[in-house]
Amino acid sequence: MNGLPDSDTATVYIVESDLADRDALCAQLSAAGLRARGFACGASFLARERAAGPACLVVDVDFEVAGSGLALQDALVAIQDPIPVVFIADDADVATSVQGMKAGAVDFLTRPFPEGVLLNAVGVALAQDRLRLAREKVSTTVADRAQRLSPREREVMALVAAGRMNKHIADELGISEVTVKIHRGNAMRKMEARSFADLVIMAHKLGMTSPALYHGGIGRHRREPA
């Protein structure tokens, strides 16, 4: 173990039917400072609750074990599980390798392979999962900030993201241009936007691409409360 908090410690899950090979893989990855968890089949892995933090899956392509190998990858795709997969095999044909890579596998390794090859593949897979988690964290943070906005600030933010000028937003919502600037400033402050461009990017991340969804179809020149 590397002493990192649970949410920061990387976990490598190994699905390998052969006990000796499974234990050897777990030992190799643990020696590299990773948390390793072994499973005899895909069903056991899918039924197990996972640890927090970045993770990847090392799967032996064993066609004799039901629900493992490529079938496990298909199951992960079906449930939209984003965990990166590294395949290992004793003797994989080209078609099998291509099928796994097309379905999103990070790498497809054929035994025997040097110790560093597996560690490099796992490193790439974990880096990919760390990036996904970072993006999800940013999206969650932006969504949480958006909860601070008033309905009017949401409307203004949506119209700003749609490329409307302040005077056009004022006309659209039936408020003064000064009031638009106030709402826009409030939106930037509450969203912690560092710039106007940052606010627009956040709006698009939140799906604020259709102003009509946010201002309820208020018609032009209709005077509404600020």
Image (cartoon, helix red, strand yellow):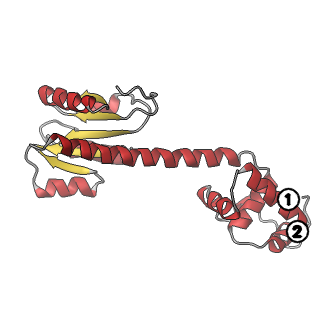
Residue at image coords 59%, 57%: 205
**Hey, which quadrant is residue 222 in on the image?**
bottom right
**In the drawing, what numbered circle is on residue 177?**
2
The residue singled out by tag 1 in the image is 182
User: Which residue is located at x 75 percent, y 45 percent?
Assistant: 148
Q: Dot 1, crowdedness within 10 Å: few (<14), some or many (≥20)?
A: some
Amino acid at circle 2: Glu
Write the residue at 76% across / 49% down.
Answer: 149
- Asked if residue 105 is positioned above or below residue 114 in the image, the reply reads below
Residue at image location 9% in from the left, 43% down from the top: 112
**Whether residue 44 is visible:** no
- Residue 213 percent across, percent down from the top left: 70, 61
Of the two numbered discs 2 and 1 on the same chain, state the one appearing first in sequence: 2
Rendering coords of residue 39 (x, y %): 24, 29
In x, y percent, where is residue 145? 69, 46
Work out whether residue 175 or residue 136 is closer to the camera in this orientation and state it: 136
Observer-nearest residue: 62 or 114? 114
Q: Label 2: how many residues lie within 10 Å, few (<14), some (14-19) or many (20+)? A: some
Q: Position of residue 122 (x, y in %)?
A: 28, 43
Residue type at tag 1 = Ile
